[in-house]
Image (tube, helix red, strand yellow):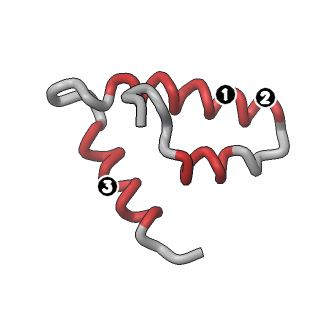
Amino acid sequence: MNKSDVNSLILEHVDKIEDDNKRQFINEILTFERSKMDRERPHFKDEYDDLIEEYMDTDE
């Protein structure tokens, strides 16, 4: 996965958003934030990691 790529599991859920403006807005935020995640101590990194674990570990 490219460092700027957003996890495909996340994108699958975002793609289900019907409102084009909301979907594009979220995609842009995710892409921007993903590009910052590999920095040493990026802002909010721990919070994002916690959210990913919380939501990706649950069954649908």
In the picture of the structure, the residue carrying the numbered disc 3 is 50
Give coordinates of residue 38: x percent, y percent.
Answer: 26, 29
Quadrant hosting residue 48 = top left
Q: Looking at the image, which residue is at 41% across and 37% down?
A: 1
| Residue 57 drawn above or below residue 25 | below
Residue 5: mark in rendering: none
Instruction: Give left or right: position of 27 versus 47.
Output: right
Q: Amino acid at mark 1?
A: Phe
Give coordinates of residue 56: x percent, y percent.
Answer: 45, 63
Which quarter of the figure is the C terminus placed in? Answer: bottom right
Q: Earlier in the sequence, mark 1 or mark 3?
A: 1
Q: Residue furthest front?
A: 1
Q: Earlier in the sequence, mark 3 or mark 2?
A: 2
SS at circle 1: helix
Q: Looking at the image, which residue is at 41% across and 30% down?
A: 2
**Dot 3, crowdedness within 10 Å: few (<14), some or many (≥20)?**
few
| Residue 16 drawn above or below residue 53 | above
Quadrant hosting residue 19 = top right
Structural distance between the alpha carbons of marks 1 and 3: 22 Å
**Dot 2, crowdedness within 10 Å: few (<14), some or many (≥20)?**
few
In the picture of the structure, the residue carrying the numbered disc 1 is 25
